[in-house]
Image (tube, rainbow, N blue to C red):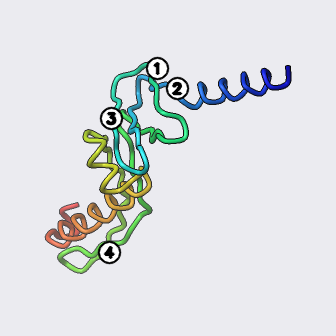
Amino acid sequence: MVRLGITVIVILVLLIQSTFIISEGDQGLVLQFGKIERIVQEPGLYFKYPLIQDLIPLEKRILAAESRPKEYITLDKKRLIVDTVSRWKIVEPKRFYNAVRNNDGATYRLNDVIDAELREEIANHNFKDF
């Protein structure tokens, strides 16, 4: 009787670990031993091999990246404090995962690019233009 109970519990745990749900605003990457096995972009119930495959959930919606206010120098050497907010979306999950792995890595990279471009653009204009 005890063996039957343990067997049922093991089967239930394996069944729970082998299913996952992708909701409407999400997408997911199924990794097998660290390599991308498949990309799931449609909502629904899906299966994976327990203990072998992992699910990396990713947002499908538009995300926001905010940075702290930074000081920039204009063409006429005046100081300007700018607070930036950018909106972005994961369009290619495989490329996204290979490049930055997660939203924090993407936000960090995106803020670096925006900061550099903004610094260059503000340096080309006088303070009164803003």
Give whichever of discs 4 and 2 has the lower sequence position. 2
Q: Nearer the viewer, residue 27 or 108?
A: 27
Which numbered tag is attached to residue 79? Answer: 4
- State the residue lying farthest toward the bottom: 77
Is the Cβ of the residue at disc 2 closer than 8 Å to that at disc 3?
Answer: no
The label on residue 45 is 1
Q: What residue is rendered at 19% in x and 78% in y?
A: 76
Nearer the camera: disc 4 or disc 2:
2
Look at the image and tell me in which quarter the N terminus lies.
Answer: top right
| Residue extending furthest toward the right | 1
Q: Residues within 10 Å of mark 1 (few under 14, many from 20)?
A: few
Determine the CA span between mark 4 and mark 2: 55 Å
The answer to whether residue 91 is above or below residue 103 is above
Using the image as rendered, state which of residue 53 and residue 82 is in the foreground: 53
Tell me which label, 4 or 1, sits earlier in the chain.
1
Q: Position of residue 68 (x, y in %)?
A: 44, 62
Q: Pick whichever, 99 or 15, lies toward us.
A: 15
For disc 3, the neighbor class at 10 Å (few under 14, some 14 to 19, many from 20) is: some
User: Between marks 1 and 3, how big is the CA–CA gap?
Assistant: 14 Å
Q: Amino acid at mark 1?
A: Leu
Task: Compute the Cα span from label 3 to label 4.
Answer: 46 Å
Classify mark 4: residues with Cα within 10 Å, few (<14), some (14-19) or many (20+). few
Chain-order first, disc 2 or disc 3? 2
Q: Which residue is mark 2?
A: 19
Element type at mark 3? strand
- Write down the residue under mark 3: 39
Circle nearer the N terminus (3, 4): 3
Badge 1 marks a residue whose secondary structure is strand
> In this picture, is 9 found above or below 73?
above
Task: Specify the quadrant that holds the C terminus.
Answer: bottom left
Is residue 86 left or right of 125 when viewed as pictured? Answer: right
